[in-house]
Amino acid sequence: MNSEEILSLIKYRLEQAQTALEDGKFLLEGARSPQSIVNRAYYAIVL
């Protein structure tokens, strides 16, 4: 994997993490289950 591919993968993973965080915020604001909110936070971290 060359440096351009690595940077592309990093960008993709950061975008996925941002989406998971936004989903978690949406769930939090909607007073959804804590389990769902934690799930989104977890995936933001591990992506």
Image: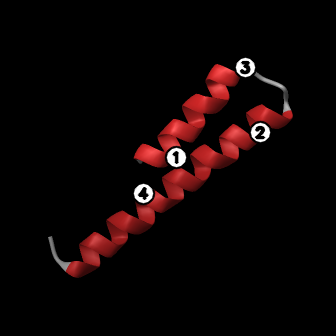
Instruction: Identify whether 30 is placed above or below 19.
Output: above
Mark 1 to mark 3: distance in Å? 17 Å
Comes first in the chain, label 2 or label 1: 2
Which circle marks residue 32 in the picture?
Answer: none
Residue highlighted by disc 2: 26
- What's the residue at 77%, 23% (across, down)? 32
Which circle marks residue 33 in the picture?
Answer: 3
Mark 4 to mark 3: distance in Å? 25 Å
Identified by mark 2, the residue type is Phe
Mark 4 to mark 1: distance in Å? 9 Å
Q: Is residue 23 left or right of residue 7?
A: right
Comes first in the chain, label 3 or label 2: 2
> Which structural element holds mark 3?
loop
Mark 4 to mark 2: distance in Å? 20 Å
Mark 3 to mark 2: distance in Å? 11 Å
Residue highlighted by disc 1: 44
Give the mark toward the camera: 3 or 2. Answer: 3
Give the mark toward the camera: 2 or 1. Answer: 1
- What's the residue at 58%, 40% (across, down)? 41
Between 11 and 38, the one nearer to me in the picture:
38
Q: Which image quadrant is residue 1 in? A: bottom left
Residue highlighted by disc 4: 13
Comes first in the chain, label 4 or label 3: 4
